[in-house]
Amino acid sequence: MAATTATIRGIRPDQYDLPTPCTEWNVRALLNHLVAANHLFSAWAAGEQPDMGVFGVDHLAGGEPAKAYEAATRAALDAFATPGATDRAAPLPSGGTGPRVVDMYLMEQVLHGWDLAAATGQDRDRDPEVTRAAYDSWYGRVPPEVRELGTVFGPEQPCPPDAAVADRLAAYLGRQVGHLC
């Protein structure tokens, strides 16, 4: 989360309207999503039902996205520190359970941090060790039916094998990275 925070601190307000590799969101919308997602993961980590209304809130209204992100991240990390939180599985929209919430949280923060860095011309591989953990946790584990939905991950994209691990993770999860490598 420190790497994503550093990326957010490097975003200027005049960059809020820039498109991101996460094609449904510009920089501002993705910043809001990241803050809201921290609230979602806090609830899941605590074994609670999340308030999905947080995704409709403008978390940047105060003009300090890094502070909003840091506060929400702190709450999420506190929730993950409670007994059993890192063992909880995420509920799937179709019913049943999915991957561990903590694995989803790590991927969410790393991938969207990469999206913001790519959109604003910043370092896309700020924390290679953490990115490697996300890569190792996710690579080869996204089922085709999840990709076919087109809502979470897209089809794997080409990426040079010697590219940074952050770019390889992004490509695996459906981001077009070839022009960045």
Image (cartoon, rainbow, N blue to C red):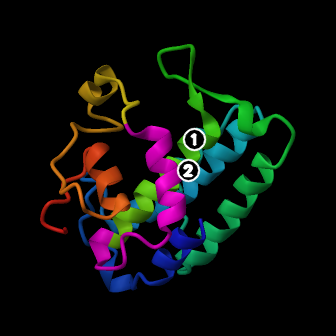
Which residue does the image show at 34% across and 26% down from the upper left? 146
Question: What's the magenta region?
Answer: 118-139
Amino acid at circle 1: Asp
Give the quadrant of the N terminus: bottom right
Quarter of the rendering containing residue 173: top left
In the rendered structure, find residue 166 and report the number of the disc placed on it.
none
Which residue does the image show at 65% across and 50% down from the upper left? 39
In the rendered structure, find residue 106 and report the number of the disc placed on it.
2
Amino acid at circle 2: Leu
Mark 2: secondary structure = helix
Crowdedness of circle 1 by 10 Å Cα count: few (<14), some, many (20+)?
some
Report the number of discs: 2
The residue that mark 1 highlights is 103
Mark 1: secondary structure = helix
Residue 136, relative to residue 6: is it above or below? Answer: above
Can residue 56 be seen from the camera position used here?
no
Q: Main secondary structure of the magenta part?
A: helix
